[in-house]
C-alpha cells in the first residue's frame, strides 16, 4: 500500500497551514511504521523533509475552477505516466491524520476499484480520504470531465455520477465505514457508527477544532487523538 498526498499550487509553495501539516504528516506516517518509499507526496515544486522528497509535476495539474479537483487532475497524470503501480493507494488531504495502522492485510478493497466514505448522516461523498487502484483511471477521468463541465468540485461530480449510476460506476465503488475519514459532523451518531479504533480524523488545526479533537471539548467529552499524534502536533506548534 502507498500513502499519497497531493498539493498543487500556482505559487509553487505550501500555504502557511500546509507548511506545518506536511511535517506533521511525514512525522505521523513514519511513526506509524510507513516506509519512506511508500510515502508519496506530489507537488509542483521541490520540497524535502525527513529525507522524503516530493515528486514534482507540472502546473497544468492545478484546477482553476475548484482547486480541490487538482488532486483528481494529478492522479490522472500519475496514471498516464505509469507512476501508479499495481497496489492500493491511500490518498488523503493534508488535514486528514491517520491515527492507527492500516495495512494491506487489515484493509480489504475487494473487487472495488475505488473506496471512500460519506459524511455519516449526510449522504454526500467525502473525498478527503480515498483508496484506489490503477484500474480506477476511467472513474478519475469521469470525475474530472464532470467537474470541468459543470464547474463543480470532485465530491459533487462523483455524487452526480453515482446518482445516475453512470457506466455502472456504483458496482466499482466501495462505501467505507466513517472510521476512515472521521470528522466533527454528527459527532455522537458517527462516533458510535465508526469501527474502532478510528483510523483517520479530518480537521483543520484551528483553535476550535484543536479543542474539539485534542482536548475533548465536544459532546462526548472525549479526546479523539492518540498521545503519539498529540506529541507530533505539539512539536510543530499546534497546541
Image: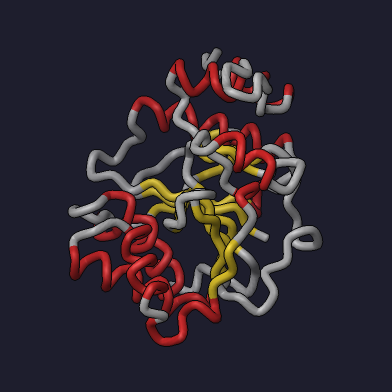
Q: Residue at x 61, y 75 (%)?
A: 112
Q: Position of residue 67 (x, y in %)?
A: 27, 49
Q: 60 and 102: which one is in front?
A: 102
| Quadrant (top left/top right/bottom left/bottom right) for the N terminus | bottom right
Q: Nearer the viewer, residue 146 or 188?
A: 188
Task: Give residue 46's position: percent from left, percent from top.
Answer: 40, 43
Relative to residue 205, is residue 114 depicted above or below? below
**Horizontal arrangement in the rendering, residue 117 relative to residue 196 (left or right):** left
Residue 186 horizontal/vertical position (percent): 52, 38
Coloration of the structure image: secondary structure
Q: What residue is rendered at 65% in x and 53% in y?
A: 37
In the picture, the quarter occupied by the C terminus is top right
User: Looking at the image, which residue is at 24% across and 52% down?
Assistant: 66
Say whether residue 124 is left or right of residue 193: left
Please state if 81 lies on the left or on the right of 195 as rendered: left
Residue depicted at x 45% and y 72%: 79
Q: Is residue 31 above or below residue 60?
A: above
Q: Nearer the viewer, residue 215 or 193?
A: 193
Position of residue 185 measured from the top left corner of the image (x, y, whole percent): 49, 37
Q: Is residue 58 visible?
A: no
Amino acid at each position: 500500500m502507498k500513502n499519497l498526498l497531493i498539493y498543487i499550487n500556482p505559487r509553487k509553495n505550501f500555504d502557511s497551514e500546509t507548511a506545518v501539516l506536511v511535517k506533521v504528516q511525514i512525522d505521523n506516517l513514519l511513526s506509524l511504521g510507513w516506509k519512506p518509499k511508500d510515502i508519496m507526496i506530489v507537488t509542483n515544486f521541490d520540497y524535502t523533509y525527513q529525507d522524503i522528497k516530493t515528486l514534482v509535476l507540472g502546473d497544468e495539474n492545478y484546477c482553476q475552477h475548484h482547486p480541490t479537483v487538482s488532486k483528481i487532475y494529478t492522479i490522472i497524470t500519475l496514471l498516464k505516466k505509469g507512476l501508479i503501480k499495481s497496489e492500493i493507494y491511500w490518498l488523503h488531504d493534508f488535514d486528514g491524520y491517520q491515527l492507527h495502522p492500516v495495512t494491506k492485510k487489515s484493509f480489504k478493497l475487494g473487487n472495488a476499484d475505488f473506496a471512500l466514505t460519506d459524511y455519516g448522516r449526510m449522504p454526500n461523498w467525502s473525498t478527503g480520504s480515498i483508496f484506489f487502484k490503477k484500474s480506477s483511471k476511467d472513474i478519475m477521468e469521469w470525475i474530472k470531465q464532470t467537474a470541468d463541465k459543470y464547474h463543480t468540485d470532485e465530491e459533487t461530480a462523483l455524487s452526480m455520477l453515482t446518482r445516475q449510476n453512470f457506466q455502472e460506476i456504483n458496482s466499482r465503488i466501495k462505501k467505507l465505514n466513517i472510521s476512515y475519514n472521521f470528522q466533527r459532523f454528527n459527532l455522537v451518531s458517527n462516533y458510535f457508527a465508526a469501527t474502532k479504533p478510528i483510523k483517520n480524523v479530518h480537521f483543520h488545526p484551528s483553535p476550535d477544532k484543536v479543542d474539539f479533537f485534542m482536548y475533548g471539548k465536544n459532546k462526548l467529552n472525549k479526546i479523539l487523538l492518540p498521545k503519539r499524534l498529540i506529541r507530533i502536533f505539539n512539536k510543530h506548534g499546534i497546541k
